[in-house]
Amino acid sequence: MYRTDTIAAISTALGNSGIGIVRISGEDSIEIADKIFRSLKSDKKLIEVSTHTIHYGNIVDENDIVDEVLVTVMKEPNTYTRENIVEINCHGGALVMKKVLNLALKNGARVADPGEFTKRAFLNGRIDLSQAEAVINVINAKNNMALDVSLKQLKGSISNVVVEIRKDILHEMAYIESALDDPEHYQMDNYGEELMPKVLSIKSKLKKLLDNADNGRIITEGIKTVILGKPNVGKSSLMNFLLGEDRAIVTDIAGTTRDILEENIKIDDISLNVIDTAGIRDTNDTVEKIGVEKAKELAGSADLIIMILDSSVPLDDDDKEIIKLIEDKKAVVLLNKSDLNTITDDKTVRMFTDKDIINVSIKNEIGIDKLTELIKNMFYSGDITFNDEVYLTNERHKYAIYESIKSLDCVVDSIESGMPEDFLTIDLMNTYETLGSIIGEQMGEDLVNEIFSKFCMGK
């Protein structure tokens, strides 16, 4: 059940930052702040001041000064939660922020649950559920494009599409119900033929959203990039170079890397989740064999594969086996050790793959700029992802769109089979309600609680 009591939490990171914010929201938030705040500029109580104003003074514990602060007063309904909100801007030390919070709790507030401020914004109708979920995406954005997509969602990019489609569906359901109740004034002759193109148009819009879902995931989570190759071809050296530090162990001993090493790397506005894998080869070593199988498994789920070959030795069966793994994947082949005598060249590799090939010397840092440029070009050209579209970045939304399309397929089948119109309303209603779950209609309390539990405490 929705609680309307007054909540408080620290809304900035704990640490020794310059400024910290303690946020209080609820009917009694201003009265609670009045109990612990003493203005140094006015005799007015905070309850008497105008909304959206800032006040200078001290936070006090009875007669003891706890901190010198600026207090922002925002009165309902024009606030983040549509409740009275007070934000106490104090110094950013962990101890002082905790003291200010404890005073708010001591005087009538309770500790906010994770995400409860945003949850109240949703429950009070200031934002819908998809916008609320976009808040955490804004906080977690790893690059400018992820931030841009999240901000568009926060402004209602997904909501607007869903609301318009639901409006069209509702219109058709209302017409059918009216015709069934009042057949003298509403004609149903050839209605199925009229409805069919409308249903197919809605389905096309939803299909476009669904098709962009993987792109949305890549933008927000990063490109899952797996480095593949035999032992000692330079996989770990590439990982270290991209990171700018010696994160992976590099030796002349084949099979050094046996476990999986994953790091997030940013190239301009592209986030790469780069995974260094065990060298793929036939081996009798039990531990190494596990690493090899894991590498093959990761290759199957990768968004991008960087395969490294040693150009100073001939291609062998292990190399050819790895090339098979990249056949149906977005991939680039690096011919490493180009500073040595070349045995395997572009022409040789072209006999086995049509993927982009770059000659590099990771040791001497030659040619790596071409790799980063190629990845950027793949990304920006849309080969991997991104253009100015509405993106789904949430698995819950993706599932709802998928289920909605299934319901529309049932509508199409019913029209083609000449089923009575009341059959159409069943699947139209399923579509309407499933889409409603994206923006927070027809939502169970447990699911709402689960969504907001992923937020930080002060948001």
Image: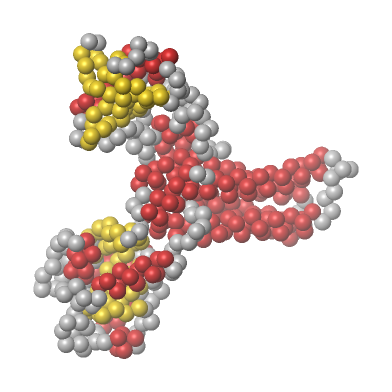
Q: Quadrant of residue 436?
A: top right
- Please tell me which residue lies in front, 380 or 283: 380
Give the side of residue 450 with respect to residue 240, left or right.
right
Q: Position of residue 57 (x, y in %)?
A: 29, 19
Q: Identify the residue shown where x is 55% and y is 45%.
A: 159
Above-or-below relation of 126 to 109: below
Most distant residue in the front direction: 41
Q: Position of residue 132 (x, y in %)?
A: 46, 40
Q: Position of residue 122 (x, y in %)?
A: 49, 34
Q: Position of residue 351 (x, y in %)?
A: 34, 88
Q: Identify the residue shown where x is 81% and y is 44%.
A: 179
Q: Identify the residue shown where x is 53% and y is 48%.
A: 158
Image quadrant containing the C terminus: top left
- Please tell me which residue lies in front, 182 or 207: 207
Q: Identify the residue shown where x is 39% and y is 16%.
A: 46
Which scheme is used to colour this image of the protein?
A: secondary structure
Most distant residue in the left direction: 252
Give the side of residue 256 with respect to residue 109, left or right.
left
